[in-house]
Image (cartoon, coloured by chain):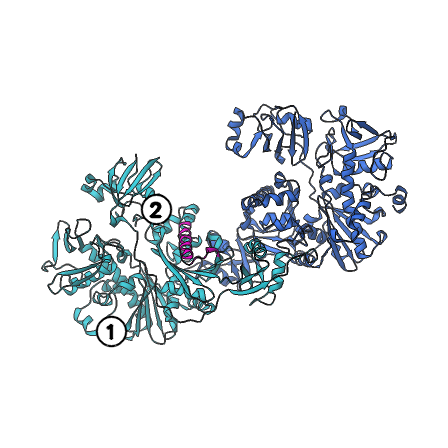
Chain colours: A cyan, B blue
Amino acid sequence: MVEVDFEPIGRRVVVPAESTLLEAARQAGVSLSADCGGNGTCGRCRVRLMSGELTQPTGAEVRRLGKLLDTGWRFACQAKALSDVKVNVPLESMRGAQRLQLGGLQPDVAIEPILVGVPVALTPPTLDDGRSDMTRLIHALQGATLGGDPYYDIAVGREAPVALRQDHWEGTAWLRESEVCAVLEPGRAPLGLAVDLGTTKIAAYLVDLSTGATLASAGAMNPQIAYGEDLMSRIAYANQGEWKAAELSQVVVEAFNKLLAELCAQVRRSPREVLEVVVGANTAMHHLLLRLPVEQLGSAPYIAAVSESWDVKARELGLSTAPGAYLHTLPNIAGFVGADHVAMILATEVYKAKGNVMALDIGTNTEIVLAHGGKMVSCSCASGPAFEGAHIRDGMRATTGAIERVVLAKNGRLKIAVIDDAPAVGICGSGILDAVAVLYRAGALNNRGRFEPGSPLVERDSQGYLVTLAPGEQSGHGRPVVITQRDVGEIQLAKGAIRAGVECLLRYAGLAHEDLDEIIIAGAFGTYVDVESAMAIGMLPGLPSSRFRQVGNAAGVGAKLALISRSERSMAREIGRRVEYMELMSQPGFTEIFAESMLFPDLNASAAVG
Amino acid sequence: MVEVDFEPIGRRVVVPAESTLLEAARQAGVSLSADCGGNGTCGRCRVRLMSGELTQPTGAEVRRLGKLLDTGWRFACQAKALSDVKVNVPLESMRGAQRLQLGGLQPDVAIEPILVGVPVALTPPTLDDGRSDMTRLIHALQGATLGGDPYYDIAVGREAPVALRQDHWEGTAWLRESEVCAVLEPGRAPLGLAVDLGTTKIAAYLVDLSTGATLASAGAMNPQIAYGEDLMSRIAYANQGEWKAAELSQVVVEAFNKLLAELCAQVRRSPREVLEVVVGANTAMHHLLLRLPVEQLGSAPYIAAVSESWDVKARELGLSTAPGAYLHTLPNIAGFVGADHVAMILATEVYKAKGNVMALDIGTNTEIVLAHGGKMVSCSCASGPAFEGAHIRDGMRATTGAIERVVLAKNGRLKIAVIDDAPAVGICGSGILDAVAVLYRAGALNNRGRFEPGSPLVERDSQGYLVTLAPGEQSGHGRPVVITQRDVGEIQLAKGAIRAGVECLLRYAGLAHEDLDEIIIAGAFGTYVDVESAMAIGMLPGLPSSRFRQVGNAAGVGAKLALISRSERSMAREIGRRVEYMELMSQPGFTEIFAESMLFPDLNASAAVG
């Protein structure tokens, strides 16, 4: 066994000799970036050896790190500890403390609780009245259920007899249709948990099921990131065997339990009082959580194993809720249009739209729905992780030190805003989108996304043209934060994919840009994105700003609505069935539309409409 | 000298300190396997230390047992007793397996399967038909269910997508009401398992659910015996904490899984094809299996936590059946009248009785039902473990070497029959009952159960009067097998408890002995007991032999009926509700009735009726 010491955070862990530093980091709870899932290709897990002995650099390290190897830089996923070692983890290699979008606009809905409480006061058993505890309870509940005869599952049979005795045969039976899910002490209101389970982030909301009030909310990174940032890497990991799939499920369940404990502690309640959990997730996350087969999600025609709304016992997954609690999953629409999209449609009330309304949830996959003439059609665009900072030379997530805003100052120089006003160490999605828009407007980029060498903003180094956003002497790590030609290309791919989806949906419905009455932008990135910048680079069609609405974490809000209202839950089920799925790849002319969408729009045209 | 107690067979022997357990077993007449002759090489004589101190493990034990040593496993030929010890002898370490009653008279019932198979042939998914696997399946099942819309649980969602792909989208969906419990490959008939879970023994039957045919049956000792022979000890053990209760459940589940594997291997099928399990058990065993609270079962008014029929997922208990399989428990009537009693009533069709019928299942607790005028009333008698050989000086279970029959030869001497025609090493329940009857008839016992010193059969040793059944020179261990005054007293207590129950039920219903049209005797002991002997000592009322019927393991048969027929299952539920429970202790005059029942009846009176 050897000890690995991660500095400057000061975490130590003892692992078997020849463990990779990434494995050690996972053990130590150090959230190293590992976009590629640990195969040495993404280069995000750079660390610097301070003392001790590691294995010789691998081919991947020699190719990617070159001379940096001489100064101790290594990839954590490749280097194995041969002795006790101390390594330095630079901020940009950390995933931690990312800004999480928890809030969202919540429509007014009537509270129609999923669970109904029936107070009971039972006569204690005697030699002459020897009815069993549960028969006694069920007799008291006759006629109280919404459906047929009341029944109860094994967890309630195990717990209620003890609870009823403790509480002198009084309590409240909480029924979900005809099923007794828990018997709580008199006067206790049951809790519910709504979860927006994203590929990168998890947002959780603790709700009073009787009043519908949100008692507390919290967010966390999805720990599956350590197994690959994109869904395909995780699907590949799960396909390696049942234990690997179980592992992926388990780490998410552990994150749920941690959030649950944290939220309950905030309001001095117990997770055991949580009687219902609603999860909105994309299809792959939904399947990985429930340990459903995912192999068929990984290749055409990308079929979900389960799509309809579903109730499973939360304990089957290992959740530390009340043992009788259910976990309700919102429906998936297709392999890449999941329950999070349904939750977004529910929360934004797109399904009620009279006119033509489009709603986008921008992420690694961007799902877009178009409501028109009482119909809804959705598609999924492979927009990639560029907006999360991946595949961008100085890209990083929206956390301390990330450039989040870029504007052109009157002096013709670039002006930046950094999260937490820290020295810049990289650039996050909204920042790079701003930067590209500003550079295009300033003439530093042409409409094909090439740097104009004549622009005073454009420099050149050994690898090609670039623009410096923060010089080394102002940055947090002594190196400049820049945008390269390749970075611009990545943004063009990402924004082109989204715009192509928008165009295909409009074409499918026979609509022009101007026919769109409203464009709703949901999701964390969508909260921070500057709509003018997005229009300037042609990610979104040029329309009056008043037609845009940024709604925050709509998926989380949708999950909450399905938690507190049975009508909203039914509506979610209906949305899952009603939404038509449009497969982009099989749309005629898709390739041409995509190619054109990667270009930047005519500045005057864009300005004219805006 | 130290005492070695061999469980679960219940043999004790006093041997010099540092005797090997194998030597002690030979002394005690316990037939341990020892193929190698006791030199530690065959590993057949494995036993498990429950209490007391043994010598350190020998090299042979360390090599062969490894980690098992930590959990108390030893080789009987190597381990020497340093103090009084109690060891558990697993069935596989015994040479002559204990006689288990598996068969029973089964009434003719129509097969009405609990699960209905619906063959499906699905169209494979395409880019244009992207329905999820389970939606595709459910669409194919519309209209096929007996109840509402078909649904499926998490286990089926996990397995069916893989199974359907493997079988080219063909298979048979097995529905239980509206729930899809499994998708099997085309043409596979599902299996079911019926289990009679007794305090001492477990009998299991593998059934073809389509035809109702019993494919194989097997029995095993209840491994909970290691935690106490009687239910009260086990309840006390479970009350020590959740882990203890879990342990008691787990050992039984392991025994189930072992039986299941054994039965399936016999017919070359897999436990994963078992889609339904039915268990009949007494109330305490039912609760311990399902891990329901038992504390309230241990003291008045002895209330069950759960009494109604119940369906729980077999996987919740850890059974290795199909993951979607249910375990159905038959209903309990009261704290000491359990589902095994209901199964017995079902199998013997007592519930159909036109006249006055009494049925008894004799065991440590003896449950008796009296059907009269369309009503049924049951009681439970604490008959104790004497008929299982416990608390009897030379008592043992019905296994090789046990005296099972005793008659008076014409020469006035006692004549014995021994199981497997082996040299006698002890006496089992039917043998001691015979012996007491014979001794009473021969005038060696008076009607109060005292030995008559004048009888030529009665001897005297330092501890008091006794009768020798097998002299030392003919026995298997060189010591005589005897019946002592105390043994007779134990039998009087046991038979008195049963007779008191019979009398109280008759009195409650206002019936005389002669009004009984039929007396049914069920259970293992009931199979082997000599009815004439039982009448002679007054355990049963004196009636013509033609009114008695011995039916074997009726509880097992009842569980099987509830497995293969939905009508029988409904009837079991109804029996659970219809049977009135009579608490013996609260019957007026019970103590007097019990006291009188312990006496032996007037020989002439008994003969006159017989």
Task: Read off the magenta span.
Answer: A249-272
Q: Is residue B528 left or right of residue A16?
A: right
- Residue at position x 52%, y 33% from top? B70
Query: Gap between marks 1 and 2, in whole Å?
Result: 46 Å
Q: Are marks 1 and 2 on the same chain?
A: yes
Label 1: element kind: loop
SS type, badge 2: loop
**Residue placed under numbered mark 2 in the picture:** A29
Q: Position of residue A165 (x, y in %)?
A: 59, 55
What chain letter is assigned to the residue under label 2? A
Q: Identify residue for label 1.
A: A544
Rendered location of residue B367, percent (x, y): 73, 49
Quadrant of the rendered structure where residue B269 is? top right
Q: Nearer the viewer, residue A238 or B390?
A: B390
Tell me whether circle 1 and circle 2 mark residues in contact (CB < 8 Å).
no
Residues A466 and A241: in front is A466
Name the amino acid type tagged 1.
Pro
Q: Position of residue B315 (x, y in %)?
A: 54, 50
Q: Residue at x 71, y 26 (%)?
A: B477
The question of residue A254 being in magenta is answered with: yes
Q: Which amino acid does the dot numbered 2 rest on?
A: Gly
Q: Of helix, strand and loop, which mostly describes the magenta segment?
A: helix
